[in-house]
Amino acid sequence: MSRIFTGQIFTGMKARIFGAFLVAGALHLIGTLLIPGYSAPFAIRALLVIAALLAVASVGQTLVVILGGIDLSIPFVIGFANVVAAQLYGQGWHFGLVCLVVFGLAIMIGALNGALSKGLNIHPLIVTLGIGMIVQGLVLIWTKGFPAGSAPKAVSAFVSIGGSFGPLPVPALIPALLVLILLVVLVMERTPWGRQLYALGSNPGAAPWALINPLWIWTSTFAASAFFAALAGILLLGFTGSAYGDVGQPYLFQTIAAVVVGGAALIGGRGSYIGTIAGVLVLTEINTLLIGLNFSPASVQAAFGAIILLLVSLYGRERHFRTTV
Amino acid sequence: MAELSAKGLVLRPGVGAISARVAPGEILGLAGLDGHGQDQFLRSLAGLEKIPGTVALNGTRIANFREAGRARIVYVPRDRRSTGIFPGLSILDNFAIATAGRDRRGPLISPAARRARYETWRERLQIKAPSPEAPITALSGGNQQKVLLARALAREPEVLLLNDPTRGVDVATRHLLYDLFRDLAQGGMALVILSSEIEEILALSHRVLVFRDHEIAAELAGEAMQTAAVIAAMFGRAG
Amino acid sequence: MRLMGRYTFAIAILIVLLVANLVMNPARFHPAAWGTLLGMAAPLIGAALASTPVILAGRGGIDISVGPVMALVSAVVIKVLYLDHGLASPLILWPAALLIGGLIGAFNGFMAVVVRVQPIVATLGTYLILGGLTLTILPAPVGPAPDWLKAMAGGWSFLPLGVIALIWWALSRTPFNDQLMAVGSDDRAAYTAGVPVSLIRFLAYVITGLLAAAAGMMLTALIGSADPKVGANYTLIAIAAVALGGVSLAGGKGGLLGAAIGAFDIFLLQSLLTTFNLSTYVLQVAYGAILVSAVVLIALQDRGAKRSHA
């Protein structure tokens, strides 16, 4: 009896992730059937690169959502890293130093988000929104709204759709992402920090008795989120070639959507980065498919919204609060 | 082997100060009507209450919960669902979460080491679970409580503070837990057990503190440990 | 009294900003210009009011489609009904606007309460759909709005806000308000006490939709035309105003008055910084800084209150 019960919960989570991968595959099949060249090597490479950038930006949102929070500062930190890296590199700084400064500042921004949210028990939505607005405003003041500079050639090559990695016909970003996925999964599944992250999200009230320090977990998790947002910002700089402060804006809702489509619950304690990767593929396929079908940007947006609702209604439903009485 | 002592604890402004000690190998019972201070007293032993007075282990002062933890004074809270289990996590995770660092080989947790550590406790506490990977919510209340006790005991406590440990636990499991507590005491651990059931306190403890109005109304030991005496002290009648 | 405490910072900021504005810009804040002034503040106040009921209802309740609802209402009322079909009467346009808002609110409520999709995701879906729909109906700004509507940004600006205040006051005399707060602070306890939790939550979404539609009308009145791009920007700033006004995003704490004060604070800040001729960049930093410091102060105050009770 209890075995049946446990089986259901575990297959439930795995089924969501598997389902999301299936949906991504089905969407790709539809695209291939409807649109000539949808599965051409170049198109697939483009799709992978765009998905990989979203995947990097979504690491943090995944961690934060498992914790039971949300991070609205991701697009602002992406924009911040994008502009500051370009500006400093343009001023002749060594790129290693540029990265050090950008990542250092991003980690501090993220740590502040987490520490304020948990330390003072303020909803992270408000804290991350407020801090994000401050960060973006400061960057705008510094650059007077006209950021200059560019990325080093190496970064551009790293993410270039036409790039290759040894014998592989994809840019180094793709194998690097696979390594990143492995690392993130190992950290979440096999380190004390990762287990504490899930535990804290699953029941904050029980955490202190289990020697979990909620403030530290929140601070470090939001710092990690900002770090990955900054990484995405620098990669985007290489991808687009020039700095743009609003480059992160699409990632605000896309990271949340990817995490949720991937099976995580916004109430915390549930989710995985593999699930998020599935969500990222689904979103990227939808976007590519709709644009390929020559929908106007307005209809792409509307259809995007409708499909997210459809997917989440199918398998992203919460338990009824009555079952938690 | 450590002796926990409390000196001059004032549970509420204006009431008398409390001093008490519990020796290695001793089981100290706490009784009283709900809300008469025994809960606060137990929590203050764990460094959780900011009230006048001091708590010390072998003469070393324990100022807060963190120091208590470091001195291996382990507190097991009362409400299993809100302050005990992590419902989204497996039995293994729930067991190992407070001592996760011990299974580390290099930077990563070794599943084999964790499993082995769990197995020894599973046998000792006779935890009945479909599989260690099953979610904790698949277990009965009694078995959940056993997992939580295993989590606490894995920290190798010097002093174990139990807040109503048999609440919502079936009779068979209760007796198993009583035997376990006696066993632990015999091994030299000091135990403080708060219970809402007088019979349980009397059966387990070497000594009982009865609380009334945030003071100790009676301290009973040996022959004096009778139900009538506890009830009399609880209700403030001269015993 | 504790409720008053939640408003303290919003009111303190209000007074400081009001005085600063009066000194810096006496003409704009002259009593004769109050109608226009309120008209300028009205869309943000409306958006903040709209965001409040779902947040009060708790369990992650939030509606990020408030801004897009405002844009859609504006587009349908001006482009479709007024310009394309010549319907100009307030007796047609207001009910049409409210119907749109109510239906969208009901849809959001259905998704969040019945289908049980997490509210932020459910309304994100609506946000995207409505954004796309609005751009399809109205690819570029058109105008003008009917004269009576434009007057609502001037001398008659108190009317829509006054009506909302009156209706909310009436609602607060019914059990609905208490039930909403009970559901927001502890839905399980409310459910055991016999409160129809799901119905109350659903109604909160409908009310949010209706108020968002009203905010859309006020926005249309202010800009005197329909603009597909303006509405969506209100979503996050309205939620910021709500938090500034002491409404707890965890639900069950705060009220419409606080949200309105919070929104007026942000408006006054905007107005002051424009007077100084500061760039919008500085404005954005100031928004963020005020928002963060206000929620920090409210949290510190809550913490102090808790300590003095213990």
Image: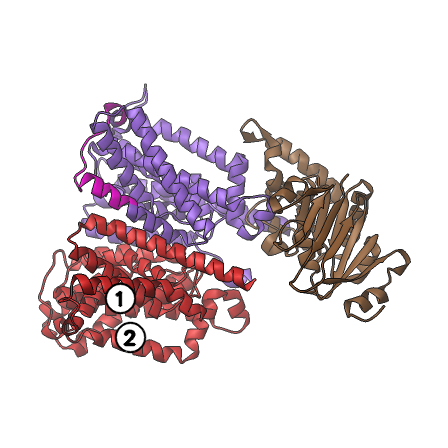
Pointer 1 residue: C45
Location of residue C4 by image quarter? bottom left
Q: What shade does chain B have?
A: brown
Along the line of sight, which residue is nearer the eye, B110 or B231?
Answer: B231
Q: Is residue B107 above or below residue B180?
A: above
Mark 2 and mark 1 on one chain: yes
Q: Going 37% across and 47% down the picture, which residue do you hit?
A: A71
Structural distance between the alpha carbons of marks 2 and 1: 11 Å
Query: According to the rendering, which colour does chain C have?
Result: red
Q: Residues within 10 Å of mark 1 (few under 14, many from 20)?
A: many
Q: Is residue C14 magenta?
A: no
- Residue B38 image offset from top left, x and y in percent: 71, 59
The answer to whether any part of residue C287 appears in the image is: yes
Residue annotated with mark 2: C164
Which region is colored magenta? A135-155
Residue visible at 37% across and 28% down?
Answer: A176
Above or below, A14 relative to C94: above
Which is in the foreground here, disc 2 or disc 1?
Answer: 1
Q: Is residue C217 above or below residue A273?
A: below
C150, above or below C294, in the image: below
Badge 2 element: helix
- Tell which circle, 2 or 1, labels the residue nearer the N-terminal end: 1
Q: Colour of chain A?
A: purple
Q: Residue furthest right?
A: B223
**Which quarter of the rendered picture does the C terminus of chain C lie within?**
bottom right
Tell me the amino acid under the disc marked 2.
Ile
Quarter the N terminus of chain C occupies: bottom left
Tell which of B140 and A43 is nearer to you: B140
A136 within the magenta span: yes
Chain of the residue where label 2 is placed in the rendered structure: C
